[in-house]
Image (tube, helix red, strand yellow):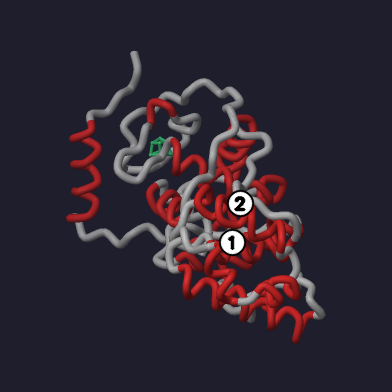
Amino acid sequence: MANLKTKSSAQTAKKSNATAGRKPATKSLYSKADLEEIFRRFSIQRPEPKGELEHVNPFTLVVAVALSAQATDVGVNKATRALFAIADTPQKMLDLGEDSIREYIKTIGLYRNKAKNVVALSEKLIADFGGEVPRTREELVTLPGVGRKTANVVLSMAFGQATLAVDTHIFRIANRLLLAPGKTPDEVEQRLLKLIPDQYLYHAHHWLILHGRYCCKARKPECERCVIADLCRSPEKIWDIPAPLVELPQQNIGAETAG
Ligand code: SF4
């Protein structure tokens, strides 16, 4: 018979952990073998996870990611399709000008500020990097509107470098599962980078986001549908039997992947 914990017992356990005055976990509870198995299963579920932000070159990816803060990928794509058709380089973006850029992206939240940033980052790319997108995080974060998380997404998607941009889903999962507990996204990122087996690092960002978006959901994790339910050490888990391990249809990575 399925080993189903009641929701209330899981909640009680969580509460009693909190009220027992224990320090929050600071180390991963997972062995090397557990981690290998978790990411092996994710790789079978989603062999080729993809980001959904449309772009035609590294420059348009930087712009798309910078525009995606507090916006959905779908909304950003709708606005950038027409924009990138006429401005796919920093120079063309400057030729277009801030007023026109603002018109193209006015359906995206914070568009006034974002239009300013697109102009400023185009100027900086021309002035300091010969119009090319730099390939290091240190250089990328010098661009206006580009933070560490955006830089990681660009390094991973445009240049194939294994990085891990910690968004709200990854931050939540790393802490909920006691996988890589941390108080800040940077802390979680550093821990995950050490834990995740090398061969899985490249896709880990997308796997964790998609797992958080479609299965280990913020308000209520759907443990009965989870392929790692047997390995998960979360006090919030309510089901111990892993769901069948099959490849899933391509899913949209959704909102707020970067910022
Ligand atoms: S078992 Fe539940 S809590 Fe654990 S990862 Fe799966 S969905 Fe999340």
Which residue: 70% across, 51% down?
Answer: 198
Which residue: 43% across, 31% down?
Answer: 229
Query: In the visual, does 230 lie left or right of 73?
Result: left
Circle 1 sits on which residue? 65
Q: Quadrant of residue 89?
A: bottom right
User: In this view, which residue lies farthest toward the top?
Assistant: 1
Q: Residue 106 location in percent, x, y?
A: 48, 63
Circle 2 sits on which residue? 53
Q: Residue 202 location in percent, x, y?
A: 68, 50
Q: CA distance from mark 1 to mark 2?
A: 7 Å
Quadrant in which ligand 1 is drawn: top left
Camera sees residue 194:
no
N-terminal of the two: label 1 or label 2? 2
In the rendered image, the quadrant that contains the N terminus is top left
Which residue: 56% across, 24% down?
Answer: 245
Question: Which amino acid is tagged 1?
Answer: Val
Question: Which amino acid is tagged 2?
Answer: Leu
Q: Residue 181 location in percent, x, y?
A: 43, 58
Marks 1 and 2 in Cβ contact (< 8 Å) = yes
Q: How many marks?
A: 2
- Element class at badge 1: helix
Q: Quadrant of residue 217?
A: top left
Q: Which mark is residue 230?
A: none
Camera sees residue 15:
yes
Query: In the visual, does 234 lie left or right of 197?
Result: left
- Element class at badge 2: loop
